[in-house]
Amino acid sequence: MSYLSLIIITLIIGMGATGYVNHQLKRYSQVPVTNGLTGVEAAYQMLRYYGIANVPVQRGREGQDFFDPRTNSITLSPSAFSARSITALATACHEVGHACQYAMGYTPMKVRGAIVPVANIASNAWVFLLIIGIAMNIAQLYTAAAIMYAAVVLFQLVTLPVEFNASNRALAYMSQTGIAAAEQKGAKRVLTACALTYVAAALTSVLQLLWILGAQRD
């Protein structure tokens, strides 16, 4: 496979995943939830349901929806924080799902946390080693670049079960607390679409790594 072909394939995968998730998010952001809860209210309610205390839920900037294990806090974007939609409900409960993982010592989350420092360094350094290795024809640098990029790929692969599990926890909570079936279905579509972005990122990274390894052999 040529590098141009790789770029085209990864662009198609990335754009397809992004387009689909944006469609689902926008679609269900216009569908209100019957319980009338905002995202932040739903998040606190789910935290109380599982007996998890001292996890603040704060408003971030648009596009900022995440759980931070360093501060044991949840950040929701304005549209998820104060909206009363299926998208807001699904987003908030998904992030609480991560808080549940942290509180309960979920193993894949621990593994991902351990990999983070290495992945952060590798994600910035591998491309420079690759370029220098190719330019100066130094096989050792090329190999080092491949190893570093493999660490990035490993991080993305470990992220998949963490994200899937958080969504499953969110959906289980909705089912257990009597959220309307139609709203559960919409939330599942939103969370499935968001999960596809992680799958797309992992897939493109694997393809990139295979290309690097193939080019190294050549």
Image (cartoon, grey):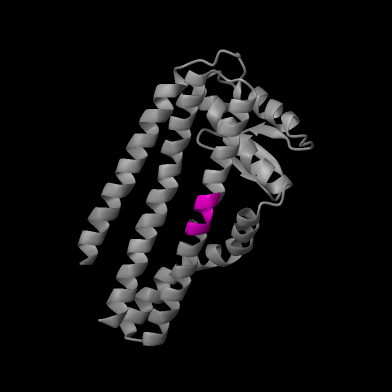
Q: What segment carries the magenta color? A: 157-161
Quadrant of res 127: bottom left
Looking at the image, can residue 141 be seen?
yes
Closer to the camera in the image, 46 or 77 = 46
Q: Is residue 4 covered in magenta?
A: no
Location of the C terminus by quadrant is bottom left
Count how many numbered circles sit on residues in the image. 0
162 on left or right of 127? right
What residue is at 52 percent from the left and 45 percent from the top?
Answer: 164
Residue 104: give x, y in percent of width and height: 72, 47
Looking at the image, can residue 81 be seen?
no
What residue is at 62 percent from the left and 39 percent from the top?
Answer: 97
Magenta stretch mostly in which secondary structure? helix
Residue 57: give x, y in percent of width and height: 68, 33
Q: Is residue 160 covered in magenta?
A: yes
* 146 is higher (above) or lower (below) than 93: below
What residue is at 54 percent from the left and 26 percent from the top?
Answer: 88
Closer to the camera in the image, 172 or 90 = 172
What residue is at 25 percent from the left and 54 percent from the top?
Answer: 9
Location of the N terminus by quadrant is bottom left
Quadrant of res 84: top right
